Image: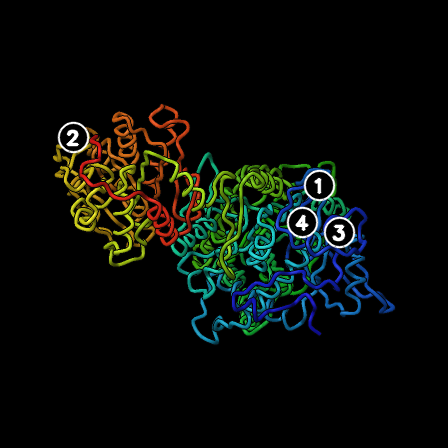
């Protein structure tokens, strides 16, 4: 039977997210739990609110940890009536709370490893909430199959481990029904979170690739929710990731988090590269923190490898000291040098590469024949399929061949353990191993080396280990493709595909002098013991607190459909420009200054034909024809095109090339307002730009009368950006003694005379009006890009310096909902034209005689 929480998948798949929580008959777990496990009815208005301005009813902060599976074990009672639950002590999620403040409450949301009948789900939910503070999400079998066994294991897991679907039999083809199952499951997880959340007080921490679109569901419901996401698997390079058909949907969903965490810089770098290449978002680094500016929100990027739970391993070590298993293993492998591998049965763990390297070492170094033993523990496969069956057969064949070729009476070089092995038994194997070998071809983190190091250190005061009373030593041979590799600087790093080099590394590890092994072990133990799971979770949570600090100070609203949904976060004073308000101020004013950018303001950026329409010409004519108005087009375009386009507007002022050329009306001459008319610097700058243009496919040079602009919008994003930075340094160096400014912008590097900006033009216009006795009492300034921010900034300075009166009605307006120094915004050029048209309709008639303009 389909779960009632699974609704409207067809709407969802088509991009229409339904408002969740309309069903009044369905009971919910309380979002604010004062008595654990009591089921209460919630008012619809309360559950559908985005953010309340009232005080919170919860004083103690909570964190809701969301993952695919809950950190609990479930099994049927012997009488088959009901369930028995216990904590899963091996679950990372269980140990995360060690890094949180003592008074912080932790709620878990996830699924169970067992299927619970629909009739039992309410009772199980109540029991888990009361005793374990867990809210289970029950996935119907068909959705579970498409979500976990389908999209997660057939698409995301192979792709994130660099396995491309080259053919139907190798990796599989993209199946949209699996994606729809993934989306549906994420939606069901979001509904469980909504049932227990207090959005103004709780933090939400989402874990791993199973739930990558969950942030969109939660952000859509609660705009100011404090939310983090941590990816425990690798994140592939952009060349691999971009093959995923739903690539942008997943990226945008992740960007609805406040902090996104990765184990290594490589994984983070790949994610940032994808954001740059596919979404055009560049990261910024400030005081050690990496962030992405996404519609006014700063999305933090956290790089922190997870650690192990020291307390759990030390507890097992105390038990293992008295365990017969250690003594038994020492007797079994007496006189042998043990190399140990502990891996899941997985196509990416490189187990067979490890066996081949062991075989090669025995060939190249016969002295180890009869002495060196590789004990390989293979944990049961988490998935199933043809690939797993093939790798199992290959491993078994290699074990058989190596043991037949190098085995002797009483000696087998490969001991293959193909069964579940408890942490206690693993500890016994760690105790006797001289070296641990990890040859995964791709792995998110892999904590086996960390466990080994701690076990070799032992517990002070224990007596049974031969290592305890002497110096501690350990050796590691690890693949350079696993997440823990950068943290283990004393390990021998290998490319597991290079069998010969890995074989030599194995020989080096077990042949190394004890003193060197001791030094490496001490270095590793210092790191592992201080960077445990509590340190990791504490560090991530502190970053989440810091990033979310101003959530409730800013104005937020959601825009966009489907997975294009995002939250725009802006200053509380930033608001949409009301035509009624500006029209009222306009009619009362006597001396008005109107400054308009062109591209992106009165002309859409996407237009191929940049010639202004007759409508725009008519509006500009009406505004500039009013004797009380001083109207300017302030643009980065050249004066020739602007002069041609606006030739019908006789009273219009034009500031071309960011204000280098200024003309107050069509019957006036062009004035130059740069600090220098010497363009000798062009002979220096142009050859440099040509050099980079030849080397950067897709780039070109735009030559203006007063400036040179290098464009790289059509170049490779990464290479173009890198070349732009190099060019900026190069030009700043060769033009250091020239009267020019070298600036970088969005896909450009520009060289222009010093003292030229739209802000300076605006200041000169205001000053000229004041000096002529016509101090502006109304200012309208509209622009859409970075250069226009100079105008918005100068308005504030003009008010402070007295160039503009404190009573001046100021309307600094940016086009588009984005962070800006302007106080107002309009959504697009259509709204700009509509607003200007309204002002034109209430403008006075044109003067009967010419020459009402001032001069600078």
The first of marks 4 and 3 along the sequence is 4
Q: Is residue 248 visible?
A: yes
Residue ID for mark 4: 64
Q: CA distance from mark 3 to mark 2?
A: 72 Å
- Tell us which disc is closer to us: 3 or 2: 2
Q: CA distance from mark 4 to mark 2?
A: 62 Å
Q: Camera-side residue: 481 or 153?
A: 153
Q: Camera-side residue: 504 or 289?
A: 289
Residue for point 16% across, 34% down: 671
The first of marks 1 and 2 along the sequence is 1
For the residues bearing labels 1 and 2, Cβ distance under 8 angstroms: no
The first of marks 4 and 1 along the sequence is 4
Q: CA distance from mark 1 to mark 2?
A: 64 Å
Q: CA distance from mark 4 to mark 3?
A: 10 Å
Q: Which element type, helix, strand or loop, lies under badge 3?
A: loop
Q: Is residue 525 visible?
A: no
**Mark 2 surroundings within 10 Å by alpha-carbon count, few (fewer than 14), some (14 through 19), many (20 or more):** few
Residue for point 77% across, 52% down: 132
Residue 581, given in percent of the width and then of the height, sits at 45, 42
For the residues bearing labels 4 and 1, Cβ distance under 8 angstroms: no
Residue for point 18% across, 30% down: 738
Q: Residue furthest top?
A: 801
Q: Residue furthest right?
A: 79
Residue for point 36% across, 24% down: 802
Residue ID for mark 3: 133
Residue ID for mark 2: 676
Q: Camera-side residue: 388 or 335?
A: 388
**Mark 3 surroundings within 10 Å by alpha-carbon count, few (fewer than 14), some (14 through 19), many (20 or more):** some
Task: Give above or below for 39 relative to 842.
Answer: below
Residue ID for mark 1: 104
Q: Camera-side residue: 233 or 133?
A: 133
For the residues bearing labels 4 and 2, Cβ distance under 8 angstroms: no
């Amino acid at each position: 039977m389909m779960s009632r929480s699974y609704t409207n998948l067809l709407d969802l798949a088509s991009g229409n997210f339904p408002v969740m929580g309309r069903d009044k008959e369905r009971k919910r777990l309380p979002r604010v739990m004062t008595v654990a496990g009591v089921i209460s009815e919630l008012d619809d208005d309360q559950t559908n609110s985005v953010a309340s301005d009232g005080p919170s009813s919860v004083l103690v902060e909570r964190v809701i940890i969301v993952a695919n599976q809950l950190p609990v074990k479930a099994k049927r009672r012997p009488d088959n009536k009901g369930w028995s639950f216990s904590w899963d002590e091996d679950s990372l999620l269980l140990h995360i709370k060690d890094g949180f403040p003592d008074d912080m409450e932790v709620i878990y949301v996830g699924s169970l490893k067992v299927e619970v009948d629909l009739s039992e789900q309410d009772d199980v939910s109540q029991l888990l909430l009361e005793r374990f503070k867990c809210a289970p999400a029950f996935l119907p079998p068909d959705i579970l199959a498409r979500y976990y066994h389908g999209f997660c294991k057939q698409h995301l897991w192979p792709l994130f481990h660099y396995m491309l679907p080259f053919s139907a039999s190798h990796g599989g083809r993209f199946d949209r029904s699996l994606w729809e199952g993934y989306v549906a499951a994420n939606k069901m997880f979001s509904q469980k979170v909504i049932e227990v959340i207090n959005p103004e007080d709780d933090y939400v921490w989402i874990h791993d690739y199973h739930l990558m679109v969950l942030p969109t569901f939660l952000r859509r419901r609660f705009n100011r929710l404090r939310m983090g996401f941590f990816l425990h698997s690798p994140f592939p390079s952009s060349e691999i990731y971009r093959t995923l058909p739903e690539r942008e949907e997943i990226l945008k969903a992740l960007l609805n988090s406040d902090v996104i965490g990765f184990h290594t810089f490589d994984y983070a770098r790949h994610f940032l590269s994808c954001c740059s290449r596919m979404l055009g978002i560049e990261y910024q680094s400030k005081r050690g923190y990496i962030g992405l500016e996404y519609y006014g929100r700063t999305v933090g990027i956290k790089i922190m490898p997870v650690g192990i739970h020291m307390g759990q391993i030390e507890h097992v070590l105390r038990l293992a000291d008295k365990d017969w298993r250690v003594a038994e293993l020492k007797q079994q492998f007496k006189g042998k040098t043990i190399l140990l591998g502990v891996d899941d049965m997985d196509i990416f763990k490189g187990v067979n590469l490890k066996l081949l390297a062991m075989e090669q070492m025995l060939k190249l170094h016969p002295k180890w024949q009869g002495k060196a033993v590789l004990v390989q523990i293979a944990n049961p496969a988490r998935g199933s399929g043809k690939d797993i069956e093939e790798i199992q057969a290959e491993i078994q064949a290699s074990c058989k061949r190596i043991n037949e070729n190098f085995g002797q009476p009483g000696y087998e070089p490969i001991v293959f353990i193909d069964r579940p092995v408890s942490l206690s038994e693993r500890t016994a194997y760690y105790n006797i191993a001289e070296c641990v070998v990890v040859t995964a071809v791709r792995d998110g983190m892999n904590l086996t080396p960390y466990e080994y190091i701690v076990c070799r250190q032992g517990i002070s005061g224990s007596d049974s280990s031969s290592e305890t009373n002497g110096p501690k030593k350990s050796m590691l041979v690890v693949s350079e493709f696993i997440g823990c590799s950068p943290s283990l600087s004393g390990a021998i790093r290998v490319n597991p595909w290079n069998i010969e080099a890995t074989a030599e590394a194995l020989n080096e590890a077990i042949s190394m002098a004890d003193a060197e092994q001791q030094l490496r072990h001490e270095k590793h133990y210092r790191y592992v013991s201080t960077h445990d799971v509590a340190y990791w979770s504490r560090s991530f949570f502190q970053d989440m607190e810091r990033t979310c600090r101003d959530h409730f100070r800013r104005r937020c609203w959601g825009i966009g459909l489907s997975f294009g949904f995002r939250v725009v976060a802006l200053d509380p004073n930033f608001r949409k420009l009301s035509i009624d308000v500006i029209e009222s101020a306009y009619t009362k004013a006597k001396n008005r200054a109107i400054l308009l950018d062109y591209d992106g303001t009165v002309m859409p950026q996407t237009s191929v034909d940049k010639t202004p329409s007759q409508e725009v010409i008519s509006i500009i004519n009406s505004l500039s024809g009013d004797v009380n108005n001083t109207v300017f087009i302030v643009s980065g375009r050249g004066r020739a095109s602007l002069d041609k386009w606006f030739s019908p507007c006789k009273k219009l002022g034009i500031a071309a090339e960011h204000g280098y050329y200024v003309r107050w009306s069509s019957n006036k001459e062009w004035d130059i307002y740069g600090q220098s008319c010497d363009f000798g610097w062009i002979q220096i700058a142009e050859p440099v730009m040509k050099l980079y243009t030849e080397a950067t496919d897709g780039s070109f040079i735009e030559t203006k009368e007063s400036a040179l602009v290098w464009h790289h919008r059509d170049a490779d994003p990464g290479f173009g950006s890198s070349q732009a930075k190099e060019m900026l340094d190069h030009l700043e160096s060769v033009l250091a003694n020239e009267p020019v400014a070298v600036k970088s912008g969005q896909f450009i590097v520009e060289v222009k005379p010093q003292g030229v900006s739209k802000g300076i033009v605006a200041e000169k216009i205001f000053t000229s009006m004041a000096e002529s006795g016509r101090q502006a009492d109304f200012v309208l300034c509209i622009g859409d890009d970075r250069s226009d921010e100079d105008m918005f900034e100068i308005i504030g300075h003009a008010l402070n310096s007295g160039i503009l009166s404190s009573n001046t009605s100021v309307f600094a307006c940016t086009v588009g909902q984005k962070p800006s120094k302007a106080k107002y915004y309009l959504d697009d050029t259509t709204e700009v034209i509509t607003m200007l048209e309204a002002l034109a309709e209430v403008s006075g008639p044109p003067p009967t005689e010419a020459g009402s303009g001032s001069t600078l």
